[in-house]
């Protein structure tokens, strides 16, 4: 049977707010699978996870000098695409019968990436992408995404377009415009845990800026439903991750809490949010996709409210493999190498 050309009008979406299983790959995979199972039981259609939920965001790199032992442990507990652990997550998505965008630290050899996998209800990896430019100190630990990672959206079997970006990719205006042009309707904004605005907290990276300003702006500008998916951290988690009780510096690093999961409508209305910054929960909303059309009647920045005759964007999207052979063959993308689930 052919997929419908138009999505169903109402969709149930959910943003994860949860604490990572810090530096523990096995426990992180199990917790991810448990969350996916819960989402399926609650009738969720689309589920979004925080940035590098596995094995947790390494804020230690912002609060101390480089630490080879910490990085080695982080490398060893990062997720390898195609590994048994990765395929357990795919199986959980299939069992739940949902769409999920999983955020994790991906290890390829000794190199790490801030990655997102789009997995469909059959457990297939429809798309896999890496953060194009790690932010600030992240560049010490993580590699850059490449041309194939400019693809930020996929379209479901029901004709709904799901998109995702990591953290401050939301502050790349040209990337956002390219994202909108791919037709995003439901957006996963993947964030780490962050402190709310206050004394000693850099306002630009505070949680209320990342949620109520940046994620909300994407919803309005792009005319999409946008989910802020966030981590939280406990005092015990901060001890494991080397986050000091007395903080300061270039990032809004909380010692405890830091969650700000919420869902925004295309007109900027906050339609769901977490109870507080400390709780673990699925933030769920039933959304009416017709609200996208209603919002874009006034301003569609990649439609009638654009001037491509004056302003246009060029995107280099041809994959450039690190090794290319004389017969033009090369190692395929990780999504292309996936094995079928039995």
Image (tube, grey):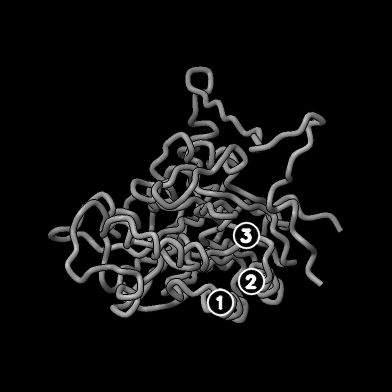
Residue located at (20% from left, 71% from top): 245
Residue located at (64% from left, 60% from top): 81
For the residues labelled 1 and 2, say whether their Cβ atoms are less than 8 Å apart. yes
Q: Outermost residue toward the left?
A: 199
For the residues labelled 1 and 3, say whether their Cβ atoms are less than 8 Å apart. no
Q: Residues within 10 Å of mark 3 (few under 14, many from 20)?
A: few
- Pinpoint residue 323: horizontal percent, then vertical percent: 68, 37
Q: CA distance from mark 1 to mark 2?
A: 7 Å
For disc 1, the marked residue is 26
For disc 2, the marked residue is 85
Q: Residues within 10 Å of mark 1 (few under 14, many from 20)?
A: some
For disc 3, the marked residue is 9
- Pinpoint residue 49: horizontal percent, then vertical percent: 50, 65
Which residue occupies the foreground of this view, 86 or 239? Answer: 239
Q: How many marks?
A: 3
Q: Outermost residue toward the front?
A: 69
User: Nearer the N terminus, badge 1 or badge 2?
Assistant: 1
Q: Residues within 10 Å of mark 2 (few under 14, many from 20)?
A: some
Q: Is residue 319 above or below residue 45?
A: above
User: Nearer the N terminus, badge 1 or badge 3?
Assistant: 3
Circle 2 SS class: helix
The quarter of the picture where residue 330 lies is top right
Q: CA distance from mark 3 to mark 2?
A: 35 Å
């Amino acid at each position: 049977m052919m997929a419908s050309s138009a999505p169903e009008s109402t969709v149930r979406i959910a943003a994860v707010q949860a604490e990572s299983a810090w530096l523990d790959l096995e426990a992180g995979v199990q917790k991810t699978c448990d969350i996916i199972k819960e989402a399926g039981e609650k009738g969720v259609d689309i589920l979004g996870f925080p940035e590098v939920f596995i094995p947790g965001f390494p804020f230690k790199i912002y609060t101390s000098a480089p630490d080879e032992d910490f990085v080695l442990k982080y490398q060893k507990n990062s997720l390898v695409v195609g590994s048994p652990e990765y395929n357990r997550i795919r199986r959980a998505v299939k069992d739940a019968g949902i769409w999920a965008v999983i955020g994790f630290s991906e290890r390829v050899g000794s190199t790490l990436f801030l990655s997102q996998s789009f997995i469909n209800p059959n457990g297939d990896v429809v798309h896999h992408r890496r953060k194009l430019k790690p932010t600030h100190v992240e560049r010490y630990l993580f590699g850059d995404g490449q041309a194939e990672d400019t693809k930020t959206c996929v379209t479901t079997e029901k004709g709904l377009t799901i998109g995702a970006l990591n953290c401050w990719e939301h502050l790349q205006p040209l990337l956002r415009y390219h994202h909108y042009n791919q037709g995003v309707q439901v957006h996963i904004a993947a964030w780490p845990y962050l402190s709310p605005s206050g004394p000693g907290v850099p306002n630009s990276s505070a949680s209320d800026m990342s949620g109520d300003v940046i994620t909300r702006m994407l919803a309005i500008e792009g005319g999409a439903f946008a989910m802020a998916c966030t981590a939280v951290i406990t005092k015990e988690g901060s001890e494991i991750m080397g986050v000091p009780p007395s903080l300061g510096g270039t990032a809004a690093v909380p010692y405890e809490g830091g969650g700000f999961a919420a869902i925004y409508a295309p007109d900027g209305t906050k339609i769901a949010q977490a109870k507080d910054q400390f709780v673990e929960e699925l933030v769920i909303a039933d959304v009416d996709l017709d609200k996208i059309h209603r919002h874009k009647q006034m301003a569609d920045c990649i439609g009638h409210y654009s001037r491509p005759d004056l302003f246009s964007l060029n995107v280099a999207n041809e994959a450039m493999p690190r090794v290319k052979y004389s017969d033009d063959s090369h190692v395929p993308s990780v999504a292309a190498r996936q094995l079928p689930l039995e």
